[in-house]
Image: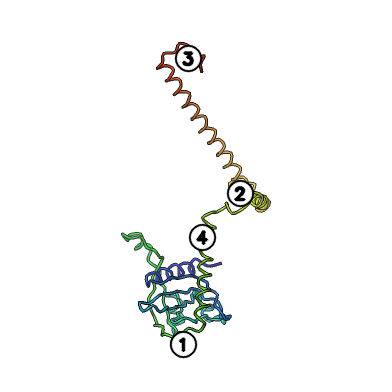
Amino acid sequence: MKTKLTKNLETTLYQYCLEQDSYVVEEVSMPDKKGIVDTLSYRQLPNGEIEWRCFELKITKNDFHSKAKLSFIGNYNYFVLTKELFEEVKEEVKEEVPDNIGVLIYRAFDQKSVELSPQTQRAPGFLTIAKKAKYQDLQVDEKYLTSHFIASLFREVDKAKRIEKGLQLYSDDKLFKELKKRSKTGYNVYKPERNLYDRFIEESENDKIAALEEELDARNAEYQALKLKLQSEDSPNMEDLI
């Protein structure tokens, strides 16, 4: 599971890439078994050439020194570190980070400043350049990198569509089985409002009552309209007609 800090870094980096006129997607598996890059951006230059940038996000010292493969296969490649982590590993950055790898520092916005800002902030923080990245040739075949990039974009679109459609994607039988399964675990006798099954039953009953009240209101409205119509016609047998 991603921590809130990791998500904040991702969100900020995503906005940073958008401001660079780049297309961007997270967690892209690299061709030729070159690992998974945390964030990959694609930018078309004015001369028509494509510029690829790879970003590895680190929030702890152990993560920074991890033996996991770094997928720095782009034209420009970066570590993205929190300000606190950068201060902690500043010397290691000088000694261990290759000359061509850049370093970006994440700083969170002050909450009070955000609340006072006349504009809505699109990210929880901002990035500054601590070390510039240097250009290198792509380390993989570009056509395969493009196909992996597109596949990851499709994954995100598919995920968004599933969230938008919500429970429509699931059959009634599957929903019923899931509801039964959850009602059997963690049932709190003393705090029924926390129990999914009880909440479902209560809200269903409330929906039924609301629907009946709406139907009754509609019928009363029809009755009053008919009554007024008959009164306007001065019908002596109005009640009988009703």
Question: Disc 2 marks which residue?
Answer: 196
Which quarter of the rendering shows the N terminus?
Answer: bottom right
Q: Distance between the residues labelled 4 and 1?
A: 37 Å
- Near-viewer residue (87 or 156): 156
Taking the image as shown, residue 97 lies to the left or right of residue 170, namely: left
Q: Which amino acid does label 3 sit on?
A: Met
> The residue tagged with tag 3: helix, strand or loop?
helix
Residue 13, position as x, y percentages in the image: 43, 71
Q: Residue at x 40, y 79 (%)?
A: 49
Which residue, given by chain and number where applicable, does mark 4 sit on? 160
The part of the image, by quadrant, that contains residue 108 is bottom left
Front-most of residues 179 and 75:
75
Tag 1 residue: 98
| Residue occupying image coordinates x 39% and y 63% | 122
- The mark lying in front, picked from 2 and 1, is 1
Amino acid marked by disc 2: Leu
Mark 2 or mark 3, which is nearer to you?
3
The image quarter containing residue 119 is bottom left
Circle nearer the viewer, 3 or 1 = 3
Position above or below: 68 against 226: below
Q: Earlier in the sequence, mark 3 or mark 1?
A: 1
Q: Mark 3 points at which residue?
A: 238
